[in-house]
Image: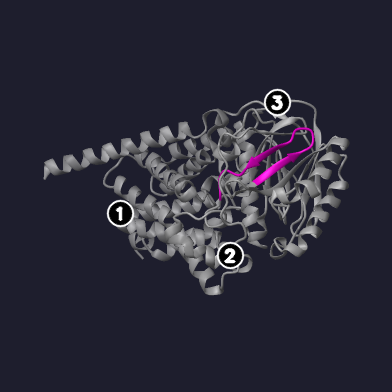
Amino acid sequence: MPINSFATNPLLAFTAGAILPFAFAPYGQSYLAPVMLAILFFCWQQSPTPKNAAWLGYLFGLGQFGLGTWWVYISMHEFSGAGILPSSLLTLLFINVLAVFPALAGWSSRWLCRGEMPVWQVILIIPSLWSISEILRGSVMNGFPWLEIGYSQSDTPLAGYAPVFGTYGVGWLTALTAVGIWLLFQLRAAAYRLVALLALIWIIGTGFKYIEWYRPAGEPFQATLLQGNIPQDLKWQPQTRRRILETYLNMTRQHWDSKLIVWPETAVPAFLHQVRDTFLSALEKTAKQKGSDLLIGVPVLDQTSNRYYNAIISLGQTPGVYYKRHLVPFGEYLPLRPVFGFVLDLLQIPLSDFTAGTDDQPLLVAAGYPLAPTICYEDAFARDALTGLPEAAYMVNASNDAWFGDSIAPHQHLQMARMRALEGARFLLRATNTGITAVIGPDGKVRSQAAQFVRTSLTEEIIPLTGATPYVLWHDWPLWTWLFLVVAGGLWLRLRSQDASNETA
């Protein structure tokens, strides 16, 4: 088969995309990410037209998200009450929408990188367009950052760049590595230069891993994370409320020796005002007597405005409340309600119309230190999870991954949380309903984790930290500036080349 025919074979692009999820947790085959991207970039550049490259990118996306995010079906069918057919159709629609983003990257890559272009332009432009497509995917309709390529490198030397350039920066370097792999098979005389460049990038990443961007802010303290393992189908039934509250109360009583005790997202299956006087007031009094602080996930109803919030409250020495700011589309709120209003009727999700909290909320204080709280989906977004740093001495995420069942989603979620800890150089405590409950160190490594689908607790000594990584100070601005300059330069060269061709003609 001629190389052009092989490269533009739809099956090759789809297969490469379907293999890509194995680079992420729980499989952890990180090397597959640059290799599969190298195959995709090769396909794009062998495509006869930008339209054909877009088609191959779309097929790659179908494989990537079809194999990597199929678990949304579980959320819709098993836990949201939708039938098999509606759940299947909505899942397919979801996967098809996500596949549009690599299609856009394919079209723009082939349109910009056509004709006789210097190698350095190709090396810079293609990774930049891939990164832009991921940034768009993480932003449009409140964003869906799952399977962003940078997360696949959480255990490789490239992860050393996370405290400097963030996960998108790690993704750009992964795509750059992919371009290098592809070009190594096409270039002969200059191949050694590419090898040297890639080796230098990975060596520098290894060096960054040895930099401690933090220092202790005080004495270590003991923290306990509770994993109640409450079945999702029983959680919101009125007759089980008392039993659930007693479960968490009994688990808490066993750990009054901890300075901090964290409950999962919406661990309290009732509005705050319904349990404040009958349950939480006595718990808070005991916490103060024991010298402990509690962080508890509970929905809050503003009875004046009739709006409700997904919240974490702190009980103990310094009471406070945090309202979730980044809501899950179709799970916690409905975008474009006039168009998608039927989805709520299909899914029947309890409390599926939350209101987002504001961005200027004060930090919670627990165990004597300010902390950066997030709820579930928020730790997938650096701009949300790192809000409050460098003032916060540690980070806490309260989650409920029961919606995903025994799938790969909780493992992917934990991998994203690891990158947040690495970007912020802080301990991150994840208390989840069914798992994966874990304590992550400032180096992004899991210090300890609980088994899934068991009622248990996790106790670990935490060091409050201070200091700021470059990424906490800069966020994504250096990367965005770089991407703009690269793409603008590529566009200028492309238009200049087109004008020259027209004049020659």
Asked whether residue 150 appears in the rendered view, the answer is: yes
Residue designated by label 2: 348
Residue designated by label 3: 215
Q: Is residue 415 above or below residue 464?
A: below
Q: Earlier in the sequence, mark 1 or mark 2?
A: 1
Residue at the limit of the structure toward the front, as seen here? 304
Q: Earlier in the sequence, mark 1 or mark 3?
A: 1
- In the rendering, at what x and y percent does residue 111 appear? 29, 48
Q: Earlier in the sequence, mark 3 or mark 2?
A: 3
- The span from disc 1 to disc 2 (Cα, nearest Å) is 42 Å
Magenta span includes 325: yes
Q: Nearer the viewer, residue 10 or 201?
A: 10
Asked whether residue 407 appears in the rendered view, the answer is: no
Identified at 45% across, 49% down, the residue is: 140
Find numbered disc 3 in the image and state the secondary structure of the residue it sits on.
strand
Identified at 56% across, 65% down, the residue is: 347
Q: Quadrant of the C terminus?
A: top left
Q: Amino acid at mark 2?
A: Gln
Q: Are marks 1 and 2 in contact (CB under 8 Å)?
A: no
Q: Is residue 1 above or below residue 474?
A: below
- In the rendering, at what x and y percent does residue 83 appear? 56, 73
Q: Quadrant of the N terminus?
A: bottom left
What is the span of residues highlighted in magenta in the rendered image?
Answer: 311-327
Magenta span includes 422: no
Q: Is residue 47 above or below residue 356?
A: below
Q: Amino acid at mark 3?
A: Arg
- The span from disc 1 to disc 3 (Cα, nearest Å) is 50 Å
Discs 1/2, front: 2
Q: Nearer the viewer, residue 453 or 286?
A: 286
Q: Is residue 254 above or below residue 211?
A: below
Residue 50 badge: 1
Discs 3/2, front: 2
